[in-house]
Image (spheres, grey):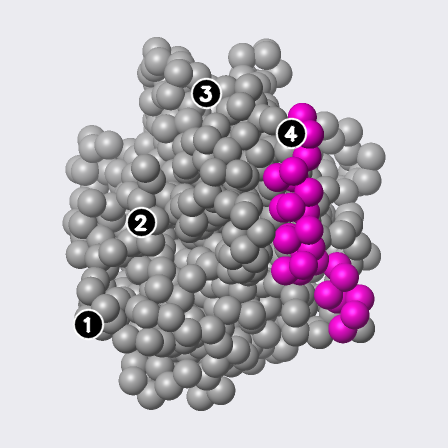
Amino acid sequence: MTATLPQTETQAESRELTYSEAIREALAEAMTADDRVFMLGEDVGVYGGAFGVSGDLVHRFGKERIRDTPISELGIVGAAVGAALAGMRPIVEIQFSDFTCQAMDQIVNQAAKIHFMLGGAVSVPMVLRTPLGSGTGAAAQHSQSLEAWFAHVPGLKVVMPSTVSEVKGLLLAAIDDPNPVVFLEHKLLYRTKGHVPAGADRVPLGRSVVRREGADLTIVATGIMVSRSLEAAARLADEGIEATVVDPVTLTPLDEAPILDAVRRTGRVMLVQEAPGHVGFMSEIAARIAGSSALYSLEAPIKRLCGLDAPMPYAPALEAAMVPQLDDIVVAGRALATQEA
Amino acid sequence: MQTVVTEVQTRESDITAIAHQPPVQDGVPAAPSTDPATARAALGTMWRIRRFEEAVDDLFARGLMHGTMHLSIGQEASATGVCLALRERDAITSTHRGHGHCIAQGADLTRMMAELLAKETGYCRGRGGSMHIADVATGNLGANGIVGGGIPIAAGAALAYKMRGEDRVVASFFGDGATNEGAFHEGLNLAAIWDLPVVFVCENNKYGMSFSTEFSMAVPHVADRAAAYGMPGVTVDGNDLDAVHAVAAEAVDRARNGGGPTLIEAETYRWKGHSKSDKNLYRTREEIAEWRERDPIVAFETKVTESGLLTAADITAARDEATDAIKAAVREANSGTDADPGDLLDAVFAPVDAAPLASSPNQDVTR
């Protein structure tokens, strides 16, 4: 049976922190441990970051290492690539993941490819942290979930930490990694709380986590959809439907075995993501299932429950209608579990 | 590794090594026409660039090399003059038209040629080709297939040096076309606000592919744009090796001593087309002929022979040595093993460091 949440720390050694605080703690510990680590981004200094993640770090580590930048996403990411090539371990904060569009050349054509293009002679050890997702009423240019774009580019590692307890260890692992890592933080998670290990234990990249086990169907979910799916699974359990919930956590490199194993066990699978469904990350998961022996275990067609194929609207009712909500997951889960083959 | 190159070494030692080890006086590399040894080394570099690219042109024409290529024939003085102003531990970023920068930084000709010939023994093991040659051992952080791509990267490398308190400088090469890219604006601005040790070198060869600078920008000189970033901007005859070296040396010195970045515009011309698809529909034969008259190599040879610094025999020797070196490079490169599809995927990701945050895989990539 695949491991569930990492149990590296006892409850006594962990504290309840918010997702933001857990990220900040990882940043601080990495910078304390290694003077090559520094952070740069828009308003990360005295402002404390647009979502408050860097907080007071500028007062602890100074303006050199918590480096405010002009509004120059391409320049910022390019500077991080250059600094990484010259021996540093930069962490870039892009204020909204939508703004990575401004920096795509440096992310896609430079950071992702330099190691390969140069025949492995150098690597680009950098982390690009950026908040993604909707639910804040910020509309179409501040609410996207672009993870599939990054996951489609060979050479980038892509992480979507969905829990407070793992985000710190995942970020430390991302900072350790000699490759460019796109670290996608969901905005709605920043204020959520959870137990965070006090130590500097890493949570390795590239491991899918089974969040819940149940025999009737498998739900694969990413980002904010993980907690939403777990909540839906609890509701379904009240009705006697037991769901397994698998969280890939790292989109690239993808650990597909726990997903395929769960599908084999349950025979029914629902893939839940916030991003629009067309050519989304869950399309890849569907293809992996369909291309494996797990296909023969299916008792019903693969169900995708995704964001609509439209830009994110402003009005609260429209925004909510755009992405899978708790009720949507419950209804779809119930239908799948009871669907005749 | 700083080496004072004597006349004897110039004659007898490895030509490639000499290119990046100019005579040093009080820590500042000497100007090309300071003394015979330096002049010979600089001339040798320009001839190696010329002969390398002529060989590449020929191999393409004969169908012995695939892909595409961008030749800098006619622009040898800017690459040579700027790199001559750099010290051993300095770095460069280069462009799609980057063979000259690479050779001027002291790259191994055989490994360069092997890369273009798609060999495992090439600089990038056949993964990069002409547009992506890098030689981190000589501080070359890489050619770049994206116009302006290297500019913010140069700023970032300079930021790393500055944060670590190292007195190293980055020279960032790009063309006139790149100065209309956002990367140019963002990279120069970052370097300026952070006083980074970068020398931005625009090789203005008058055309971004086919589009003339006459139409692509509304100021007379690329260097005029420096004012927008609060840094010095200087336009220089890019075909005058000594002139390029002089402005580069001053800019490098300023950068190394905390004076921040400079934008140099080296006015030059590419004799050949943009790439092999170019039919030269956007410029006249007369214009090309006029610039061929301003051959930077001939100009330097004339200057140093008229001044008596070098003899006619020195000139012939520099040319012949370069010809021989390139022939040898082609021969040796051809004998290398071909890139193997069997390990195509082995360098997509770097192996995860076994000793996180304790080791430093990139610390010394630029020596």
Label 2 Cα crowd, 10 Å radius (few <14 / some 14-19 / many 20+)? some
Instruction: Name which residue type carries label 1.
Output: Ala
The chain identifier of the residue carrying mark 1 reads: A
Q: Secondary structure under badge 4?
A: loop
Residue A335: within the magenta? Answer: yes
Instruction: Name which residue type carries label 3.
Output: Ala
Of tags 3 and 4, the one toward the viewer is 4
The chain identifier of the residue carrying mark 2 reads: A
Classify residue A151 as left or right of residue A83: right
Q: Which numbered disc covers residue B212?
A: none
Q: Nearer the viewer, residue A325 or A179?
A: A325
Instruction: Name which residue type carries label 4.
Output: Ala
The chain identifier of the residue carrying mark 4 reads: A
Prevailing SS of the magenta stretch? helix
Distance Cα–Cα, label 4 vs label 2: 33 Å
Label 1 Cα crowd, 10 Å radius (few <14 / some 14-19 / many 20+)? few
Tell me, yes or no, whether the two marked residues, 3 and 4, touch with CB atoms within 8 Å.
no
Which numbered disc flags the more N-terminal residue, 1 or 2?
1
Q: Where does residue A90 sit, x and y in percent of width and height?
A: 37, 63
Q: Nearer the viewer, residue B347 or B124?
A: B347
Task: Say which residue label 4 marks.
Answer: A300
Q: Where does residue A105 sit, x and y in percent of width and height?
A: 59, 51
Task: Say which residue label 1 marks.
Answer: A12
- Magenta residues span A316-341
Of tags 3 and 1, the one toward the viewer is 1
Q: Nearer the viewer, residue A90 or B202?
A: A90
